[in-house]
Image (cartoon, grey):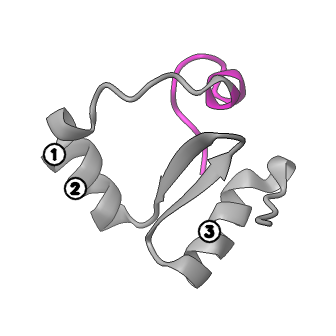
Amino acid sequence: VLQVEVTQLIASLRKLSETYGPIFTFHLGSRPCVVLSGYRLLKEALIDRAEEFSGRGDFPAVQQWSHGNGETPG
């Protein structure tokens, strides 16, 4: 069972990326969540290949945490 400290979400995901690498998936309930970690990987996904990575579904927890603007701090 994977444990993520919700109040320290970014720190928890960074720690997991040290164990599992810069790309990993975990499930919140039945919903898979893909985590990308690191500048180059994020740039490739969000800028260089933006069209391929667009259209992701809404994720209620992130919407609430980001106050509906889709941006997460960290």
> Please, is residue 21 above or below residue 67 in the view?
below
**Quadrant in which the N terminus is drawn:** bottom right
Badge 2 element = helix
Dot placed on the residue nearer the N-terminal end, 1 or 2: 2
Check disc 3 and report the residue beneath it.
14
10 Å neighbourhood of mark 2: few (<14), some, or many (≥20)? few
Which residue is pictured at 20% across the width and 44% down the height?
47
Q: Amino acid at mark 2?
A: Glu
> Please, is residue 57 above or below residue 43 in the view?
above
Badge 1 element = loop
The x and y percentages for residue 56 are 38, 29
Dot placed on the residue nearer the N-terminal end, 3 or 2: 3
Range shown magenta: 61-74
Check disc 1 and report the residue beneath it.
49
> Please, is residue 37 above or below residue 17 in the view?
above
Q: Residue 57's image quarter?
A: top left
Give the overall secondary structure of the magenta segment: loop
Disc 1 to disc 3, C-alpha distance = 23 Å
The x and y percentages for residue 72 are 58, 38
> Please, is residue 12 above or below residue 16 in the view?
above
